[in-house]
Image: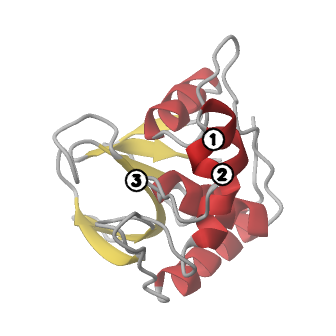
Amino acid sequence: MIIQPASLKLRFAALAYQEGRLCLTGNACKAGPDIEKYLKVFRQALGRKDPKYLDAMVGYDWCCAYVHYLLQLIDVKLAIQPLTHSDWMLGAVRTWYLWARQENIFLPASQQAEPGDLVLFDQLIDQVELDHIGIVLQDKGDHILTSEGNYHNRSGIFIRPRNPTIRGYIRL
């Protein structure tokens, strides 16, 4: 389990805010020079499964890479494949969820979020469970303010109402 001091979580939230304000956008292939810094996080691991991902012109859904990239910037090191007896990696929101449950650091959506928590979404973008992840900047009671990557292929700061699209939080 990872336990971050409050000051590190606040630094993470501040960094996520600054990064979200950049509003970077990928190209039609969910790649491109503006977002390659995020994509590089999982490019080698994805390339071992399919060599096409070694090409910087080939992109992928990058919300998890955005979160992982920002965690690396504050020296939080997470294994790309954190689950015991599984080759799933943190490039999938479902893996973040399963890993957080395994580590007992997942909180249901009914809990209050803290700056620096990760937020997991269901059916926010597509009609599938666990389809998106972001970083909580503030909990405003009836909504949360987040920093996210790959919300319709761009990063940004978003206001998310408290509704069934929020699955819960990961408190590192």
Q: CA distance from mark 2 to mark 3?
A: 40 Å
Q: Point out residue 116 in the picture as x, y percentages from the top left corner.
A: 58, 63
Q: Residue at x 57, y 56 (%)?
A: 65
User: 170 or 96: nearer the eye?
Assistant: 96
Residue kind at label 1, given as amino acid type: Pro
Whether tag 2 and tag 1 are in contact, CB under 8 A, the answer is: yes
Q: Residue at x 62, y 31 (%)?
A: 49
Q: Which mark is residue 51?
A: 1
Left or right of 11, for residue 168: left
Residue kind at label 3, given as amino acid type: Gln
* Quarter of the N terminus within the rendering: top right
Q: Residue at x 76, y 46 (%)?
A: 3
Q: Which mark is residue 112?
A: 3
Q: Foreground mark, 2 or 3?
A: 2
Q: Is residue 137 visible?
A: yes
Q: Point out residue 82 in the picture as x, y percentages from the top left corner.
A: 70, 29
Query: In the image, is residue 4 above or below residue 15?
Result: above
Q: CA distance from mark 2 to mark 1?
A: 6 Å
Whether tag 2 and tag 3 are in contact, CB under 8 A, the answer is: no
Left or right of 123, for residue 41: right
Q: Residues within 10 Å of mark 2 (few under 14, many from 20)?
A: some
User: 2 or 19: nearer the eye?
Assistant: 19
Closer to the N terminus: mark 1 or mark 3?
Answer: 1
Q: Residue at x 61, y 33 (%)?
A: 89
Label 1 element class? helix
Residue kind at label 2, given as amino acid type: Leu
Q: Point out residue 135 in the picture as x, y percentages from the top left corner.
A: 49, 62
Q: Which mark is residue 54?
A: 2
